[in-house]
Image: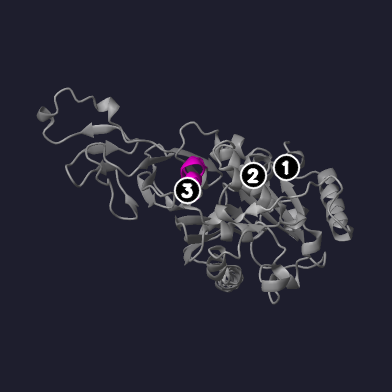
Amino acid sequence: MKLNEQAIDLVHERMEYERSRKAPPPDFPALPDIPGSRYVDKLFLALERERMWKRAWLFAGHTDQLPNPGSWFVTRNTGSPILVVRDLKGEVRAYYNTCRHRGAPLVTEESGEARGFVCGYHGWSYTLEGALTAVRDKRDFVGLDFSCRSLVAVRCERLGNLIFINEDPEALPLREHIGPMADELEQYELDKLRWVDSRSYEVECNVKVLIDAFLEVYHIKSIHQNTVDRFLDHRGMVVTLWPNGHSRMLTPNSRPDWRDPGTINMPKIQSITSVPANNNVSYHIYPNFVMPASDSGIPLLQFWPITKTRTRVVSSWIAPDYDPENPDPLWETRLANWERILYEDLQYAPQIQESLQSPGFQGMPLNYQERRIYHWHEELDRRIGLNQVPPEQRVAQVLHDQVVRA
């Protein structure tokens, strides 16, 4: 859904208000400190993993990674080995990479193509739709009901060509879960954008340290002085908080006529409105998917907890009219520039983690510009269960009147 002229005018009015304000809006609540132990306490982090990460919609990949019926890949970012496959009818499905006999993996490579899956341990066989079709020495499995031994499915849904999975069978459908964002994302025609590149980086810090960094632009004048601070006006940044922890951050260019010189001659997404085309917009699908969309290509960032103090950052790109057999040479420069900016964001994370574990870190006093971080933590407590979070680690629910529900 494109933004109409009235909505575009409202965005520009909000940008101008943000630039000119002398204090936070009168109706904005005071934000209590975020307790520091939420980043280091083992019991809290265990609650976070079981109650939030295991029940969240998480990005798994792109349909270009499944080019043909029978194509598959394995993702382990959720902490479980999950097999994502395109079946013979072209539908994308997901299963645990776990044979129903004794738990051996169905596949041992990272990706491939198959007409079905045969466990390498004892030869149990499954269709691409997950149905058990054969077992070795069937005579010795008296009364085995094949219909009860299909592969265990994982919820799998798409936003255009983007594949998301969820280990909670009771989760809301993906589009319903992301609410108003779903309609706004239609302007990007995600079903037409091609897979360009993906790279990963491991960083010695808790995952929230990095998620926090990508939910605000308060830091850009300090660590991005020679990159994005040259063309972004962080003081005009507009935030939209959506239900279920999702949000959008829209940061205007310092000059209305500024265009990234490296992308001027690249193919454009013709369907998007002037707001994302001429400014920097970043969408956040809770908990760990950040999409700073542009009209010539979209980075997809995910932040995955490996351990309590180690994080994997995955940086991928999708773009219009990208030909993997004959890539535009401009992409080499663009990806290098992006990686430079990304390294600027990652540079302090290990030292921050060291500080988090010291007595000097007791809590975080967040400002109005950092309200997306507070919104993230409020949602975390709701997903864990407000009565399940220890009182000394709980975040007060104060932003409810700031959330846009339609």
Circle 2 residue: 378
Q: Which residues are magenta?
A: 45-56
- 259 with respect to 65 (left or right): right
Circle 1 residue: 398
Q: Depth-wise, is mark 3 or mark 1 nearer the camera?
A: 3
Residue 199 visible in the displayed image: yes
> Answer yes or no: do the residues labelled 1 and 2 have beta carbons within 8 Å?
yes
Foreground pick, 147 / 387: 387
- Give percent across and percent down for residue 318: 56, 57
Picture quadrant where residue 92 is located: top left
Tell whether position 47 is magenta: yes
Circle 3 residue: 43
- Give percent across and percent down for residue 39: 55, 56
Q: Amino acid at mark 2?
A: Glu
Q: Amino acid at mark 3?
A: Leu
- 231 with respect to 192 (left or right): right
Picture quadrant where residue 370 is located: bottom right
- Give percent across and percent down for residue 30: 77, 49
